Image (cartoon, helix red, strand yellow):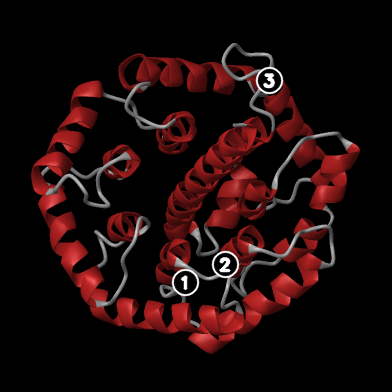
Amino acid sequence: MGEAKIRQYLQLYESMKTTYKWKIGDPALRMIPLFYLMKDHPFDPQRYESFLRGIRNETGMFSNFRGTNQYLIAAMMDTEGYTAASVSQLMELEKRLKQQKIRGPYMPMVAVSLLSEPTLSPRLVKSQEIYQLMKKEHKFLTGSDDHPMAVLLAGDARQPEQLIERMEIYYDRLSKKRYHKGNMLQMMTHILTVLQPEILQISLVERCEGFLDEMKRQKVKWSDYFYPQIPLLVLNEQPIEEVVRYLNEYTKQLSVTKGFKWQGSMNTMLAAMLVVSDFMKSEEYDALLRTGVTAVIQQIMQAQQAAMIAAVGASTAAAASASN
């Protein structure tokens, strides 16, 4: 397990790097190939460029759809089966999101996740209620990066108060199990809440509780930015030590690869998504996904990867500033 997946990832990464290394920030450039691997979607440079042209033609220089976001959006739309003509629809959706006061750098990710939503208004209203309840519980943690998860949670049949109550239970439990309180733990609880419908028989939070202990035992490096990926890793019935062993194998293979040798916990985050993409192909994982979370798992990955890219980019900038 691992070598073929790593090779496939590196081939796509090197292909994109040749064209985009001076255009896309490094964390995003390492992440974008994962969208294609997750969907088993072939990367076509001409098709990808058609999305980029569409975004540039429809937006101004300072739009939140520009910069690194345009490359993420192009990958998301491409792997979801949209065409470049859908960019116009995306811009119409932007106007509606702004009316609901959903703005900022994460708004484009929200727009992409809602492109296929048939009845948009009720979900947007519910998402704003969830967002305000998040702010009530965690005033200083909740910001624009939580909008994608609020919209995702709004697709859940449970009432906003029930969802927030469940998140707080998870937040309290995990903060006592080596997890640091903060924005990444909050995002992790959002993901757990979506992935833990009543029909799912295994307890994901119980599986998360001992995960970092096992990571430490197997000497796998991680940072808090890794937290949101853990629920996706435990969404199966394999022993936690086996899941971490797979993760360790992928991380080690990346760490001896040229261009990845000094990436530390970034390699762990990349490895995690490669492991998840393998799990998604297994009968066991597929059976769990049929419990009702199939429709949301890709949206979770989009929101989580977008936030992780921004977080890693911010931490890299902070480290560079400190070194200067």
Q: Which residue is mark 2?
A: 190
Give the structural element (helix, strand or loop) at label 1: helix
Give the structural element (helix, strand or loop) at label 2: helix
Give the structural element (helix, strand or loop) at label 3: helix
Farthest front residue in view: 324
> Please, is residue 159 above or below residue 188 in the view?
below
Quadrant the C terminus occupies: top right
> As shown in the figure, which amino acid type bears the numbered disc 2?
His
- The earlier-in-sequence mark between 1 and 3 is 1
How far across and how far down the image is residue 212, in percent?
A: 81, 49
Farthest top residue in view: 258
Would you call the spot at circle 2 few (<14 residues within 10 Å), some (14-19), or many (20 or more)? Answer: many
Q: Is there a contact, CB below 8 Å, between mark 3 and mark 2?
A: no
Q: Is residue 278 visible?
A: no
> Please, is residue 150 above or below residue 319 in the view?
below
Distance Cα–Cα, label 2 vs label 1: 8 Å
How far across and how far down the image is residue 121, in percent?
A: 25, 79
Q: Which residue is mark 1?
A: 153
Number of the front mark, 1 or 3: 3
Q: Which residue is mark 3?
A: 255
For the residue pair 243 and 175, the one nearer the viewer reads as 175
> As shown in the figure, which amino acid type bears the numbered disc 3?
Ser
Q: Is there a contact, CB below 8 Å, between mark 2 and mark 1?
A: yes
- The earlier-in-sequence mark between 3 and 2 is 2
Q: How many marks?
A: 3
Would you call the spot at circle 3 few (<14 residues within 10 Å), some (14-19), or many (20 or more)? Answer: some
> Please, is residue 216 above or below residue 165 in the view?
above
For the residue pair 156 and 223, the one nearer the viewer reads as 223
